[in-house]
Image (cartoon, grey):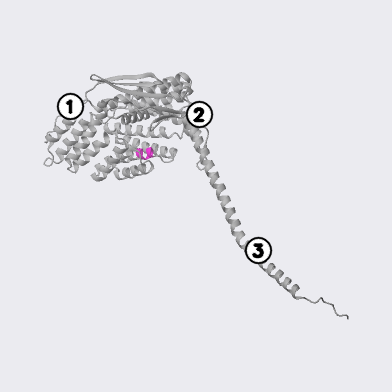
């Protein structure tokens, strides 16, 4: 077999081969290093890209939401300009800002169950809200606003509410304008040394009420066949205890649409309110029951009607108890309990139903159970001032005065215009012999409502009988009368002190 002939390898060729091998080795090393670096970099770049995409998406979503909300509310905003006040009012603490906010609060109190809503410096009018759903709760804004949407005429958009106090001589005048037209004007005698801030606050509230009535009247002219609008107008009259006007509004609503359970229920409450607890007849209560039953016939799950029915049964139980008919009274208490339980089922366990049950258990002598229901009500609705007041009264009855003070104080914060929490605070502090604190609370109650003087006097008279050695009744009485301006007097003192 012939031998393979090989070309002799020279020194130059050997060097070339070696260099090529080194180049290949270096290239392989560089390629490996490149792969080792590029893989993490590629992952990093990919992650950064996805993160940036998500961030931009989130920013875009927020921007769209903000634009939507701005579009939703700005078109329905009514400017509430700052109220101008003279220096004499500012010196009393009624600065332009304070007066403006008081007008806002007064308008809010007159807003008629949701027709409008006052924001810090704006009157927000809800109109033509889109049907936006929240998937988690299947809640539709369109359904939630119910009777509120589409009630207001388009002409109300971009309205301007403007007010001004002027001091001419010894008279302080308030003028309120809507779109430059005067819709309310009044004046009161004024002197910085003796003027009553409550008169000015009443002036503001009355002006807001007049403005709200005017707006409803305009709306009804624009939508004469709107039953929901008349129902809302009726609630405004109820808030101001204008019973005849309220009855007319609700009956007009029913004439337009007899199927409205809220109008029937509202008429039931009006009848119930007109019952005097001192009466020994049930005429108004019977009529109230008929209205509540009419509401339930149209909507068996209408919680407000169940609640009204419960309080109507409580009223009847009191009447029968005064007549000495304990069996009928017992039956009415049981019917009241069932009605409030139905209210709770219909509303998903509302605070109102719990407060109603508390009234029932207290009336039946089960005070501990009443306290439990009130605590449940407050957990459901921490801002329910009435529940805090009733819990304070229950704690006073249990002689747990510190707990009562805490409940009344919470109610005073939640409803600063009510005299009732301060009367409760004064009575509780009297029981703890905190005379100065008690007088201060009674004084605040009297400042808010002059008829509170009678209740405060009764509280100190009662304490004087309970602890005659600890109470300087004549001195406390004198201080209370002074807080009322010295023009009103406490009732005749009891025989004890």
Is residue 460 placed above or below 52 in the rendered structure?
A: above
Say whether disc 3 or disc 2 marks the residue closer to the N-terminus.
3
Along the line of sight, which residue is nearer the eye, 281 or 118?
A: 118
Residue 204 at what x, y percent from top left?
Answer: 31, 25
Q: CA distance from mark 1 to mark 2?
A: 52 Å
Q: Where is residue 143 shown, x and y percent of the image?
A: 50, 33
User: For mark 3, does the 10 Å Cα neighbourhood hold few (<14), some (14 to 19), or many (20 or more) residues?
Assistant: few
Residue 96 visible in the picture = yes
Q: Crowding at label 2, few (<14), some or many (≥20) Cα neighbours within 10 Å? A: some
Residue 400 can be seen, yes or no: no
**Residue topped by disc 1:** 488
Q: Secondary structure at mark 2?
A: loop
Asked if the residues shown at circle 3 and circle 2 are in contact, with their CB atoms under 8 angstroms apart, the answer is: no
Instruction: Examine the structure image and report whether residue 114 is included in the region drawn in magenta.
Output: no
Magenta residue span: 351-356
Q: Main secondary structure of the magenta part?
A: helix
Mark with earlier residue (1, 2): 2
Mark-to-mark CA distance, 3 and 2: 67 Å
**Which numbered disc, 1 or 2, marks the residue closer to the eye?**
2
Residue 271, image x, y percentages: 35, 26
Q: Which secondary structure, mark 3?
A: helix
């Amino acid at each position: 077999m012939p031998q393979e002939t090989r070309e002799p390898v020279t020194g130059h060729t050997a060097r070339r081969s070696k260099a090529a091998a080194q180049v290949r080795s270096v290239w392989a090393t560089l390629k490996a290093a490149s792969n080792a670096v590029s893989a993490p970099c590629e992952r990093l770049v990919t992650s950064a890209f996805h993160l940036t995409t998500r961030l931009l998406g989130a920013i875009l979503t927020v921007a769209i939401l903000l634009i939507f909300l701005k579009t939703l509310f700005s078109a329905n905003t009514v400017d509430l300009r700052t109220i101008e006040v003279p220096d004499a009012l500012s010196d009393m603490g009624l600065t332009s800002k304070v007066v403006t906010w008081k007008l806002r609060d007064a308008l809010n109190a007159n807003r008629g169950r949701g027709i409008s809503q006052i924001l810090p410096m704006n009157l927000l009018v809800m109109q033509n809200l889109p049907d936006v759903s929240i998937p988690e709760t299947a809640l539709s804004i369109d359904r939630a606003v119910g009777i509120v949407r589409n009630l207001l005429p388009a002409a109300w958009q971009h309205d301007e509410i403007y007010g001004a106090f002027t001091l001419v001589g010894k008279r302080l005048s308030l003028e309120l304008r809507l779109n430059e037209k005067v819709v309310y004007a009044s004046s009161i005698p004024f002197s910085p040394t003796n003027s009553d801030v409550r008169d000015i606050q009443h002036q503001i509230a009355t002006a807001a009420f007049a403005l709200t009535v005017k707006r409803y009247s305009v709306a009804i002219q624009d939508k004469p066949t709107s039953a929901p609008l008349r129902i809302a107008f009726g609630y405004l009259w109820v808030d101001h205890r204008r019973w005849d006007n309220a009855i007319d509004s609700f009956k007009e609503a029913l004439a337009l649409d007899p199927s409205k359970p809220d109008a029937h229920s509202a008429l039931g409450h009006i009848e119930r309110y007109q019952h005097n607890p001192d009466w020994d007849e049930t005429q108004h209560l019977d009529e109230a029951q008929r209205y509540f039953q009419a509401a339930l016939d149209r909507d068996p799950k209408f919680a407000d009607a169940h609640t009204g029915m419960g309080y109507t049964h409580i009223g009847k139980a009191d009447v029968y108890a005064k007549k000495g008919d304990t069996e009928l009274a017992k039956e009415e208490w049981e019917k009241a309990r069932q009605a409030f339980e139905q209210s709770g089922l219909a509303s998903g366990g509302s605070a109102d139903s719990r407060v109603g049950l508390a009234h029932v258990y207290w009336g039946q002598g089960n005070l501990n159970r009443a306290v439990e229901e009130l605590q449940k009500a407050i957990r459901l609705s921490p801002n329910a001032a009435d529940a805090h007041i009733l819990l304070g009264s229950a704690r006073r009855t249990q002689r747990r005065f510190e707990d009562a003070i805490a409940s009344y104080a919470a109610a005073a914060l939640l409803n600063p215009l009510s005299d009732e929490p301060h009367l409760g605070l004064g009575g509780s502090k009297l029981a703890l012999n905190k005379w100065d604190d008690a007088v201060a609370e009674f004084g605040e109650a009297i400042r808010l409502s002059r008829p509170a003087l009678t209740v405060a006097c009764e509280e100190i008279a009662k304490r004087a009988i309970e602890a005659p050695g600890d109470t300087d009744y004549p001195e406390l009485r004198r201080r209370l009368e002074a807080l009322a301006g010295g023009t009103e007097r406490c009732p005749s003192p009891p025989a004890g002190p």
